[in-house]
Image: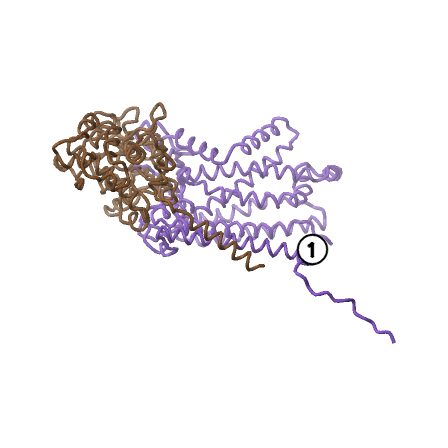
Amino acid sequence: MKKSVFFGTLAVAAMASGAVSAQSMLEQVQARGELLCGSNTGLVGFGAPDANGEWQGFDVAMCRAVAAAVLGDPNAVEFIPLTTTTRFTALASGEVDVLIRNTTWTFSRDVDLAFEFGGINYYDGQGFMVPRELGVSSAMELDGATVCIQTGTTTELNLADFFSSNNMSYEPVPIETNAEAQQQYLAGACDVYTTDTSGLAATRASFEDPGAHVILPEVVSKEPLGPVVRHGDNQWGDIVRWTLNGLISAEELGITSANVAELAAGTDVPEINRMLGSEGELGAMLGLENDWLVTVISSVGNYGEIFAQNIGEDTPVGLARGLNAQWTDGGLLYSPPFR
Amino acid sequence: MATLSDPPSEGFRLSQLLYDTRYRSMTIQVIAFMLIMAGLIWLANNTVQNLAALGKDFDFGFLTTRAGYDINQRLIEYSNDSTHGRAALVGILNTLLVAFVGCILATIFGLFAGVLRLSNNWIVSRLMGVYVEMFRNIPTLVWILIVFAIMTEAMPAPRDFRGEDAEAMMSLFGTVAITNRGVYIPSPVVGDGALILGLVFLASIIGIVFFRRFAKARQEATGEQLPVLWVSLGLLIVPSLVFYLILGRPITLQYPELTGFNFTGGVHLRNSFIALTLALALYTGAFIAENVRGGILAISKGQTEAAFSLGLQPGRTMQLVILPQALRVIIPPLISQYLNLTKNSSLALAVGYMDVRSTLGGITINQTGRELEGMLLLGLFYLITSLIISAAMNVYNNSVKLKER
């Protein structure tokens, strides 16, 4: 009797644990009817709720694009705010389907943490912001400064490298979220705030007096930011990767939210026809509707539209395209062909 | 010839396991044990399977790799070239520092508040009541954040100290700088002859202990009271002071000075440390105050009256009669308050204090992706620390508890 109970329990246990993850990610998301998107806890321009509680921003638009591709509805997203320290655990444990939250693509995250980066949606680098009244004009003058830094980020490691390679000392003040960092920085509890320059610009834009703060010219690291998924479901990884590539290609080929419906009927450019589904079966190969990119672009626009709307030069964040221009314009955005 | 027949021996039947009271409890225990083991095996099995599915292994090798991040408050040598293991050790020491200072402060707060809450003075007792209820009924985390917010928002920045007519002044005759980055206090600088001074100081303390014993023996023998307090104070201060001057001031103070961005020199008590320690001490102190009050109330009023009728003054009554008896009631719950304080110190990350939860359980896990290993080590550390505290306090409890003769 003892043995039968024991083996019976074991068998049940084995079945229970074996039954996990029989469905593919795509089926899970479609069955749920909602995309769980890991997002920033609040970084204006990239991912933050607006005055009406609607999530807005550059990374948020990417989440909506994936939701539009998979579910046909850009609003079928639940945004799950994650701090820099909780994001990877949340993704690895399946709490979110995709993490789109200013996350730097590094070797160890890709390989050791067993994640898959779906390309790069923003080429960034780490910078420093100081109050103008300090009179500092270069990061090399920061010896002995107190530096506010978000813990659990690549910036934390870059900062240590930058200061030790230049034989300077500093006092790190570790902080969990961008909002806390902003509060500490404005209260003068630290002299310098360091994070990705895009994040600095976004943070500065939300200050009462943005002109009183300068972003120092030094960019001390490469920070390629992109959407992240777990290892283990390549189809899901492909969907995220090609949604991003679709947004980038759309800008390159001149497909915008305004003309996408018209172009979807068919054009004399074969790649546009393949992307928008009037020729070939590219959508079906991903397990999606054939006109998936039409839905995506008509609901969030192409890469350039998303950029201009959320963080471009006409917004308070005011970022220039810089490295994030199309390769044809001297930038680094270069989508593989849709073929 | 009568033969005594044995009672008919029945063979053991399986149903006896359930219906025979001799075996039933055994059966239930065996089944419960198997269920628990099956549950544990399921958990372990599930973990192994899921780790395998994620392509992760179980390895503590990350502790010997380069950490790469800096820690602001370190009690031992550490740089970003040190290992993750070393970073964890720095964090452990920071946790222990908060726990140690916090427990001492909490005991002082608790003892005073508990005794004073029983005061006959209406205002004093009500004030202590307000303190206890305020701190006991608002979560620790909120208190930590409140103290931290006050420290960072209300205090001047270091650059306000600059210039001829600076906005802020250093306190205590220009020796202490209270800024929104923490409090800078003078630090001792040890010179030649400091060792001799230390030995003299040690000798004075031993002298005080012996004098107290002598005074007590004398009082018990003759009833004569010696001025213990004044002699003790004299013994403590005079020889050390004399030697300090003879040896040519071997220990000097280094005062904090404003250079560049920050104050340098002296000891920097960071805001995060002050906020965490103070908030934890005040919070736990409120609970200890209630333990102390309960302990005192548990001593029958007759004891006080008896002491008064012998002519003891209220202070000495408390010190000699009530507290020694009350301690027996106070110590056991005090142990769990110390444990609470130690474990609550893991809220440190909220104010950016680099305790073991923030280094090993935060940054290291994040940079290496070793959640399971890191969290297990973290759990083990808190478990061991708590067990040690509880063992030490139990030793003390055994020394004060009622000895039955």
Which residue position is annotated with label 1?
Answer: B19
Eyeballing the image, is B214 above or below A253?
Answer: below
The C terminus of chain B: image quadrant: bottom right
Q: Is residue A132 visible?
A: no
Q: Quadrant of residue B260?
A: top left
Eyeballing the image, is A215 above or below A21?
Answer: above
Task: Give the color of chain A as drawn.
Answer: brown
Eyeballing the image, is A294 above or below A87?
Answer: above
Q: Residue at x 23, y 29 (%)?
A: A301
Q: Residue at x 66, y 49 (%)?
A: B401
Q: Is B296 displayed left or right of A165 in the figure?
A: right
Q: Is B266 displayed left or right of A138 in the figure?
A: right
Q: Which chain is purple?
A: B
The N terminus of chain B: image quadrant: bottom right
Chain of the residue that carries numbered disc 1 in the rendered image: B
The image position of residue B365, as x and y in percent, is: 37, 48
Foreground residue among A179 and A102: A102
Farthest residue to the right: give it. Answer: B1
- Colour convention: by chain
Is disc 1 placed on a helix, strand or loop?
Answer: helix
Q: Residue at x 62, y 32 (%)?
A: B117
Q: Is A174 displayed left or right of B206 in the figure?
A: left
The image position of residue B327, as x and y in percent, is: 64, 44
- Amino acid at pointer 1: Tyr
Q: Is residue A217 visible?
A: yes
The image position of residue A289, as x and y in percent, is: 27, 36
Foreground residue among B266 and A146: A146
The image position of residue B288, as x and y in percent, is: 58, 39
